[in-house]
């Protein structure tokens, strides 16, 4: 639980009023459960508007209890200075001449609240409680706005970095073609075209992943959850990566059997499986295998994707689910990716009250396990079988 101490300046020409306010608020505390914050108050007093302004200039308080009628400079004049030069101070006007006109005038000039004399200790505490809550929530809003700005700046910086390299590569290949350094039909010409298309595919994947991530964060799903057959979704995801797997001799093992349902948005399930299988093939070794297993029980539904790929260390696995996080070493240097796929998987899993975990070892492979809520009438496991078109192990 956090704790805050707010300074309250009481400006009133009546000694009894200053002393009474100090006595009431000295041990008064406010707990704000929405922010898990305990607020205490430090009381400072002044007998005139001039003295109050001198204190404000030296050490501005957070809350100002300001008498309307003062000797010398009047309360509304002090309020004008505070509103003009000290916008963070929350003024509360105190007056024995309570009227609609006075309240409206004080509010227009920046007063947060209005307290009519004579007031009870409970009324004073109620005003301070409301003021404290306003200040803490205002601070929190400012902090969130600052954090949002920083996140947006970091996001744009990382995005620019991720796009700079492929754009530079495509530009380099196009200039080679423009300068006729290689001729159409030659190996160099075909290589320049193939590499450019590969880089463009990577940028397109990055854009699509960003759109998915934005849609998830904004809560704009494709519709209400419906029963989704996980086995059918796993087979579709396997068919999507089958050409890449076949080109490298990677065996795909997917579950077979009767339908296995989970209540979810179909598009979310497809995103999870597509990202897991795409990574399992991408970071696998030639001639390796990808094994997809599905199971349901009282604890929920699990999706497990195991590969026999390059694997990773515990340190690498710890940062794997962060945005734009990619494992960079000698074995992954030539592998393209947005660094967003596993972040999307984690966000989707947590959206349904589940999570994703990874077990991995360098040179052995990785196993990703996603937990999702299951339909109450489904309790069985899917047995892996080879994906059509891939040789049996």
Image (spheres, rainbow, N blue to C red):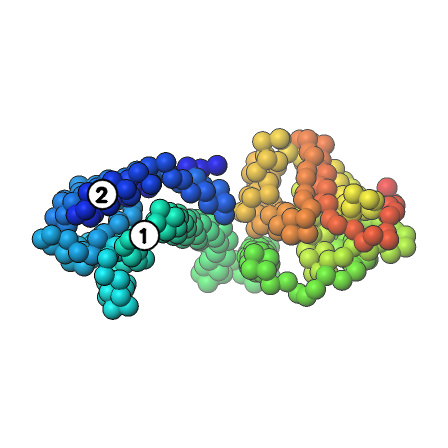
Residue that protrudes farthest toward the left in the picture: 72
Q: Is residue 294 above or below residue 225?
A: above
**Residue occupying the point 56% across, 56% down:** 217
* Label 2 element class: helix
Q: Nearer the viewer, residue 268 or 210?
A: 268
- Give percent across and percent down for residue 125: 37, 47
Q: Label 1, on which residue? A: 119
Query: What's the mark number on residue 257?
Result: none
Query: Callout 1: few (<14), some (14-19), or many (20+) C-alpha neighbours within 10 Å?
Result: few
Q: Is residue 96 above or below residue 292?
A: below
Residue that protrudes farthest toward the bottom in the picture: 101
Q: Nearer the viewer, residue 20 or 197?
A: 20
**Residue occupying the point 72% across, 42% down:** 369
Distance between mark 1 and mark 2 Cα atoms: 13 Å
- Give percent across and percent down for residue 278: 69, 50
- Give percent across and percent down for residue 367: 72, 38
Answer yes or no: is residue 189 visible: no
Exactly how many numbered labels are in the figure? 2
Query: Callout 2: few (<14), some (14-19), or many (20+) C-alpha neighbours within 10 Å?
Result: few
Is 297 placed left or right of 348 in the picture?
right
Sequence order check, earlier mark of 1 and 2: 2
Q: Nearer the viewer, residue 312 or 301?
A: 301
**Residue occupying the point 88% across, 47% down:** 380
**Residue occupying the point 73% across, 49% down:** 372
- Give percent across and percent down for residue 19: 25, 40
Q: Label 2, on which residue? A: 16
Quarter residue 94 falls in = bottom left
Whether tag 1 and tag 2 are in contact, CB under 8 A, the answer is no
Q: Quadrant of the C terminus?
A: top right
Answer yes or no: is residue 45 visible: yes
* Label 1 element class: loop
Is 122 placed left or right of 277 in the picture?
left
């Amino acid at each position: 639980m956090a704790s805050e101490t707010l300074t309250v300046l009481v400006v009133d020409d009546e000694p009894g009023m200053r002393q009474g306010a100090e006595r009431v608020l000295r041990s008064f505390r406010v707990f704000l459960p929405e922010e898990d914050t305990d607020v205490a108050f430090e009381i400072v007093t002044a007998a005139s508007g001039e003295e109050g302004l001198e204190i404000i200039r030296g050490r501005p308080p957070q809350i100002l209890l300001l008498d309307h009628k003062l000797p010398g400079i009047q309360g509304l004049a002090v309020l004008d200075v505070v509103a003009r030069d000290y916008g963070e101070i929350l003024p509360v006007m105190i007056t024995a001449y309570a009227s609609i006109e006075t309240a409206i005038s004080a509010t227009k000039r920046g007063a947060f609240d209005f307290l009519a004399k004579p007031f009870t200790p409970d009324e004073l505490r109620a005003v301070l409680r409301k003021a404290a809550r306003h200040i803490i929530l205002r601070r929190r809003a400012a902090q969130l706005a600052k954090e949002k700005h920083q996140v947006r700046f970091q996001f744009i910086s990382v995005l620019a970095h991720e796009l700079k390299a492929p754009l530079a590569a495509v530009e380099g290949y196009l200039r080679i073609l423009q300068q006729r350094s290689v001729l159409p039909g030659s190996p160099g010409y075909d290589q320049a075209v193939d590499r450019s298309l590969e880089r463009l595919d990577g940028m397109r994947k990055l854009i699509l992943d960003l759109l998915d991530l934005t849609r998830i964060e904004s809560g704009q799903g494709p519709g209400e959850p419906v029963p989704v057959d996980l086995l059918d979704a796993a087979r579709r995801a396997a068919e999507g990566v089958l050409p890449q797997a076949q080109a490298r001799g990677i065996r795909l093992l997917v579950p077979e059997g009767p339908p296995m349902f989970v209540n979810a948005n179909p598009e979310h399930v497809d995103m999870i499986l597509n990202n897991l299988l795409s990574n399992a093939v991408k970071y696998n070794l030639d001639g390796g295998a990808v094994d997809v297993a599905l199971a349901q029980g009282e604890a929920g539904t699990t999706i497990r994707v195991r590969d026999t790929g390059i694997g990773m260390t515990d340190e690498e696995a710890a940062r794997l689910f962060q945005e734009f996080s990619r494992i960079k070493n000698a074995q992954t240097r030539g592998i393209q990716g947005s660094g967003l796929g596993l972040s999307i998987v984690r966000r989707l899993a947590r959206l349904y009250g589940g999570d994703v975990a990874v077990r991995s070892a360098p040179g052995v492979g990785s196993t990703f396990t996603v937990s999702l809520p299951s339909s109450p009438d489904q309790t069985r496991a899917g047995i892996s079988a080879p994906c059509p078109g891939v040789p049996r192990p």
